[in-house]
Image (tube, rainbow, N blue to C red):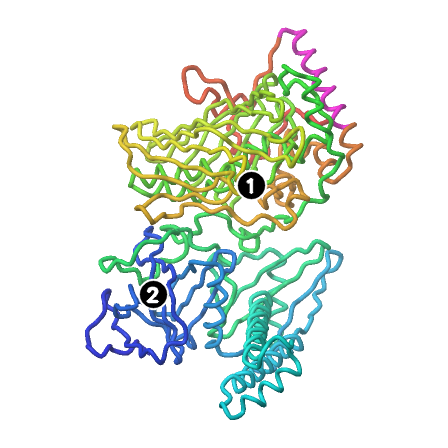
Amino acid sequence: MPPARSSSGVSSHGGHEAVKVQKEDIVFAGWVLKKKRKKMQGYAKRWLILTKQGMLTYSLHPDKPTRDAIEIPHASVTSSKRHGTLHVDSGASVFHLKVLEPADFDKWRSQLKAFIPDASPGSAQRIFVSSNNSTELVAVDLSPVFNASITVGKLIQEVQSRVGDFKSSSTASKGLVDSMAAMVMPRNENGTEAIGALSTIVDQLAAEHANLSYALQSKIPVQGSGSTGTMRSLQHRDGMKSDLRQSRMSFSSFRTTETGEGTFFDADAADGSFNDDAAKEEQSSGAEDFDEDDDDDEDEGQGGDDGKPISGVVPASQSAGKKYRKQLPAKVSGDEVSLFSMLKKNVGKDLSTISFPVSFNCPLSLLQASCEEYEYAPALLERASKTQDWVERLCLVSAFAVSSYSSTKLRASRKPFNPLLGETYECVRDDRNLRFIAEKVVHQPPIVAHYAEGKGWHCTGWSAVKNKFWGKSLELIPEGQVRLEFDDGDAFTFTKPSSFMRNLLAGNKYLEHVGELTVTNANSGQRAVIEFKEGNMWGGSGSRNQVVGTVYDENDKKVTGLKGKWSDNFARQKDDENYQQLWEADEMPRNAEDYYGFTYFAISLNEITDDIKKILPPSDTRLRPDQRAFEEGKVDEAEKTKQDLEGRQRERRKQMESKGDSYEPRWFHKSKGEDPEWQFGGKGGKYFEKREKKEWKEVPKIFE
């Protein structure tokens, strides 16, 4: 039903009729951040009130009239504890809320849950379990778990009621209450203190039960009767496409456990459900003081202008009919040899000329490391390609540049495999709107050329790394050029900061990027200068990874500020207290440090899925046997194979030199007077056209 008219009969700002709230009707109230109605404006500070009737209202200030209201019993409520967000959807209005303090999340969630109708008694609540060695799904009925949770909840309410009766006992019976309390409470507490302590314990128990109920409802949604759930789960496992923007009321998901078993969830949640928000949270944040001239009560959807999550990551269950692995075949393999001792033996030498033991590596190549930098490119650059605002475009391109470092968050002393000359790597991901190809084009110093493209943009570049040993740390100095172009002709170039491997001698090793990253519009001269700050010696890990930037126009005038962490997020300054979040890193896999600190995207890069087995050229990194063996934990086999491959490479180079020949890359060529120096396209023709036809006859089999 529509919100009630205020006593004054005057509509509140924004066209929504004000709701008059009596003080005695208020159950819970407080400040929260609410997403504003206009796109790209982020969040604003608002006063939220929940009444005894289950009406949720908000206003600019406790003394101001309400602007909109939603009846919780007739709404869908979703939440994300990791992001501290709550979404209340009545169908006519949507409140996207973010709490100011982590402790406020549980308080608001618990209060809202009290007005959510319980699931119908006796409804079947099942999960379908299947092992990798079987195609059969076994239904596990969890109704007893849910029924027990409901029973415990009722008992807790009963205890709360009894404690309330004790607390409100009359003066005449106070002596009896004190006597009873003394029997079960410490002697140094009087009756009032004892009842108060008991009340606190019961409240804590109620809160923990609410968390348990929430976890059950969000992780194992209600299953309808019949065979529908089984069929839909089977279809999902077989890779059928699912809608990118699924309804909150009906969804399927897949999880692979560490034991190799798959668990299928499938549900039709009842209206009024309180679910964990599985979609990516909206990507704007910040707070501002209440402002009567700036309305904010209309839903703008999740994510960017096109409604897509800014992170650009489509969950595996929603990808274009494909699922990518969520875990490597083996944990970190090989004994960690002291990098310091190796460096000490080779002071002054270029590390690219030293053959390191395989245990110094992680199971990715430099080619794949180049691809990692494009994890968040599709959505950020697709958004940038659509905007006509040069400031917004430059900020989004800067967000992409910063996001390219996020995959190194948990990387320490292990380095990628050095590719063989002529080795290639492709990444074609329809679910991400991304096509990528890289090739090692020069042996010494190792140079990798790459090309990437998405909707409305393409990027060409090359990279190499120099190094300096500083005693306790190793500095990696990036060299190369990258040019990003949009379909409208706008182009951007990048300069990158140095990276440092810290604590090589002692202590916990970590990777830190320090220096300036500059993003320049090659046509207009407008630029963003972003400083990667060095961590404070006394501030610990909390002081690391900070970035602060400034956007300048073509006249070198400051336009706006930028800030964030290269490991986590990046935002644009709107005013003194309000930042619009442009990008947020995805959650790391569980036990990521046991698997080389890889992100989910990195875990998928060396995987050979069924759809590409017959498409890959014989030079693709995924076919490299030593890296494959190392990924599987076969360290001795990997070491031997690595030495054999490098030995055969040296023989090929000697034979070529004896004939007076030099290596000519297949998919890239060295340009004359163009930036970047290495351009996409070579003697092998156009890579992606060859890929469609599987024309790999002339591609050398460098791994055989």
Against 662, is 290 above or below? below
Query: Magenta: predominant secondary structure element?
Result: helix
Q: Looking at the rendering, which quadrant does residue 379 occupy?
A: top left
The image shows residue 544 at horizontal and vertical percentages of 52, 38
Whether residue 698 is visible, yes or no, is: no
Q: Amino acid at mark 2?
A: Trp
Other-residue count near label 1 (Cα within 10 Å), few / some / many at <14 / 14–19 / ≥20:
few
Specify the segment rendered in magenta. Answer: 641-660
Whether residue 675 is visible, yes or no, is: yes
Label 1: which residue? 541
- Horizontal side of 646 relative to 4 (left or right) equals right
The image shows residue 326 at horizontal and vertical percentages of 63, 49
Please report the residue visible at 24 percent of the width from the left and 77 percent of the height from the top.
6
Question: Residue 642 in magenta?
Answer: yes
The N terminus: image quadrant = bottom left
Q: Are marks 1 and 2 in contact (CB under 8 Å)?
A: no
Q: Residue furthest front?
A: 188
Against 231, is 461 above or below? above
Please report the residue visible at 61 percent of the width from the left and 23 percent of the height from the top.
422
Question: What SS does tag 1 mark?
Answer: helix
The C terminus: image quadrant = top right
Closer-to-camera residue (98/136): 98
Residue 74: assigned label: none
Label 2: which residue? 47
Other-residue count near label 2 (Cα within 10 Å), few / some / many at <14 / 14–19 / ≥20:
many
Closer-to-camera residue (236/306): 306
Q: Amino acid at mark 1?
A: Ser
Closer-to-camera residue (588/196): 196
